[in-house]
Each structure stands twice: as structure tokens, then as C-alpha cells.
Image (cartoon, grey):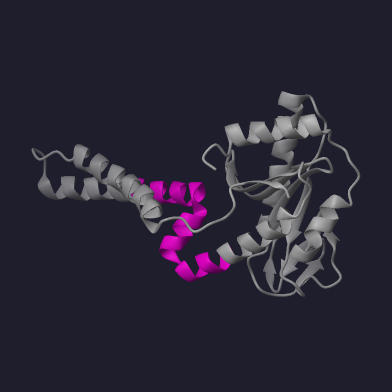
Amino acid sequence: MAQVIGYPTRQSIKKDLSGLLIMLGMAVLTAALMFDPGANLKSEVFSSLAVGAGIALVLVFVYSRINPMGFQRIVSPKTFERNLFQDQAAADALNGLDDDAYVFHGFILELFRVEHLVISGQGIFVISKVRKNGEIAEKNGVLYCGEDTLETLTGNTWRICHLISIVLKKYFRLELMPRPVILVPEGSGGSIKESGGIAILTNGELGEFIQDKPDCLDQETAASFAAFVRKRYAAHK
């Protein structure tokens, strides 16, 4: 069984709310500190409210990037439950990898959220998921789910791969490009198995896809890089 870091679970709603409320409290405090009771009352109230609202919007955006699942749980519980089910299904599919494989779930790499990351002797795999329903198709080199383009998803997945490649070269003197993978719901992928260098798979195909790859990373390097990722990016897991 793979070594799992950060299996997706449902955290306490109090923990998700407390982080958001602390950020909103900072916006209220800033607005209060800017209020000058000796000046024109109407003008000062309007100015403080405008500043507080602007700061609150920025902080809410930051919170949604830092803790997207927690934010989603607050604003759209049904979507959160559906996405959590998808996350756990993908995590379960990865649990069966070999003992020397390291599997990370749901962490922030610089400014990008990594849904799943596998570090093993077969290489490094960056795994994202299609959250929408619809048939997967490729039109003019662009991947679609139904009528919706997946350019943002594929672009971010490749960016994460390049970031990891830079980290490997800088800290481990290793030239290795991670393999991007996009998971699609069962039956929606059709005959498309690859698009723009990204593997298109279902949960049922994921484990075999990884384990069938030839070894390209020695066990010591894989363990060292996994320890690096855990300490620097997933210490809270």
C-alpha cells in the first residue's frame, strides 16, 4: 500500500468558519482604525466602509485559494460533498500503489492547488480531476467537457508539472518532467486517452497506468523529494 499524506476528509465546519471569520475580522478592524470621528461623519463612514469592503473581498479571495474545499463547504455544501466524493474515490484508487510510492492529496504548491501528487520509482505524476459532467472531446487541440473548455484545468496541471521540474533541478539537480494526468468520470472519456501530452484516465485505469511505467527515479531520490514536499508544502497534513 502507498504511503498516503493528507487523505481527503471532512474537517470540522468550525475550523473552516474560524479561518474565514478571522480574515473578515481583520477587514473590520482595519476599517475601524481608519475611522476619524473628528472629520465629516458621513464621509468618514463611507470611506471606512469602502476600505473595509475592499479588504474583505481580497481576503475572501485569498481564503478561497488557500482553503478551496473549506470555502466551498461554506458557500456550496452540495458541491463540496460531490467534490469530496470524487477526491476520496481518486485517493482510494491510488492507495493500491506499491509501498515505495508516496501519495499527496490537496496541498498548495506556490499559488497552485495540487489535487493529487504521486512520487514513485515510476516517476512523478500530477493528477487533476474534471469536476463537470459531460462527454470529453478534443476540438482544435483543446479539451472540452460537454460545451465547456478545460483549458484552465489543463493549463494549471502543466504549470504545476513545470514548477515541480524547476524544484527538482534547483534542489536535487535532477532533470525530470512530471507526467500530467486528468481524471474523468467513468464512461465520459470515450476514446480519448491523451490530449496535449496529458493522460486522460478514469479512476479504474489510474493505478495500472502508473505501475506500468518503467522505473526512472531511484528509491532514495523519491523518498528525499517526498520528504521535501511534505516539509515545505504539506507540513499541515
Residue 156 appears at what percent x and percent y?
A: 67, 50
Magenta-colored segment: predominant secondary structure: helix
> Quadrant of the image for the C terminus?
top right
209 sits to left or right of 182? right
Front residue of this view, candidates 43 and 64 = 64
Residue 103 appears at what percent x and percent y?
A: 69, 46
Is there any visible trace of residue 162 in the rendered image?
Answer: yes
Q: Which residue corresponds to the image point at 82% horizontal and 35% vertical from the top-left?
A: 176
- The residue sitting at the left extreme is 38
Q: Which residue corresponds to the image point at 49% horizontal and 59% vertical from the top-left?
A: 10
Is there any visible trace of residue 196 in the rendered image?
Answer: no
Q: Quadrant of residue 233?
A: top right
Q: Which residue corresponds to the image point at 74% horizontal and 72% vertical from the top-left?
A: 186
Front residue of this view, candidates 71 and 139 = 71
183 sits to left or right of 84? right
The answer to if 10 sits in the magenta stretch is no
106 over 235 or under it: above or below:
below
The answer to if 78 sits in the magenta stretch is yes
Q: Quadrant of residue 101?
A: top right
Magenta part of the chain: 54-83
Q: Which residue corresponds to the image point at 80% horizontal and 34% vertical from the top-left?
A: 219
Residue 48 appears at what percent x and percent y?
A: 23, 45
Residue 134 appears at what percent x and percent y?
A: 70, 75
- The residue sitting at the right extreme is 214
236 sits to left or right of 75? right
Total numbered badges shown on the rendered structure? 0
